[in-house]
Image: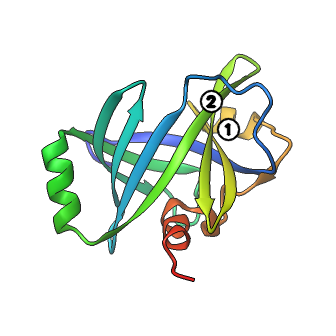
Amino acid sequence: MGKYTNIEYERRFLLRQLPENILHGEDKEIEDWYIQGSMLRLRKTIKNQEIVFKLTQKRESVAGDRSKHELTTIYIDKAIFEQLKAKLPGIPLYKTRKYFQRNGKKLGVDVITLQQKQILILEVEFKSAEELLLFEFPALDITHDYTYSGYQLAILQHKKE
């Protein structure tokens, strides 16, 4: 693990509908650019008119365990974001992250449109493996289902019919 790498514990759930207690005015627009042939992603986020650009490497700590990742992020400016996006082959994923509160924890649901159908994915991050294992949510756990990875969803989002 690198000097600037953090460990991220995460579980993902497929929702049938948005939770009722969505926090209005908290939405974040996200554009991800998955760089083909790598574990790298460019990300642009817009929330309340603030724009943030990042280059991130996210890889499994243990092969096949999609709940624990080594995450390295570099914050970049718009010019570098655009330059990298123009030069590196990749595929975009556009989504809106909506937030809600559950048991005092702020949670994010990604709303992704695929061929006029919305996919709702709840992503929950934890500080430890123990906390991750204790979390329960009444929805299908898709943490280990690669079909719902960002890269695979990007492919589906831009697939020509």
Q: Horizontally, is 130 left or right of 29 in the view?
A: right
User: Residue at the right extreme?
Assistant: 138
Residue under numbered circle 1: 132
Total marks placed: 2
Q: Is residue 87 above or below residue 106?
A: below
Note whether 155 is above or below 28 in the view shown.
below
| 99 and 124: which is toward the camera | 99
- The kind of residue tagged 1 is Leu
Residue placed most toward the observer, 72 or 62: 72
What amino acid is found at the position of numbered circle 2 in the picture?
A: Tyr
Dot 1: few (<14), some (14–19), or many (≥20) neighbours within 10 Å? some
Instruction: Give percent across and percent down for residue 68.
Output: 54, 49
Residue drawn at (61%, 65%) of the image: 114
| Percent position of residue 129, x then y | 62, 39
Q: Is residue 114 left or right of residue 31?
A: right
Residue 117 x, y percent position in the rendering: 69, 62
Q: Which residue of the protein is positioned furthest toward the bottom in this rendering?
A: 161
In the image, 138 versus 3, the foreground residue is: 138
Q: Secondary structure at mark 1?
A: helix
Q: Residues within 10 Å of mark 2 (few under 14, many from 20)?
A: many
Look at 38% across and 39% down and name the residue there: 45
Instruction: Say the numbered circle drawn on residue 99.
Output: 2
Marks 2,1: beta carbons within 8 A? no
Residue 91, quarter of picture:
bottom left
Q: Is residue 139 above or below residue 124?
A: below
> What distance separates the C-alpha of mark 2 from that of mark 1?
19 Å
In the rendered image, the quadrant that contains the C terminus is bottom right
Q: Nearer the viewer, mark 2 or mark 1?
A: 2
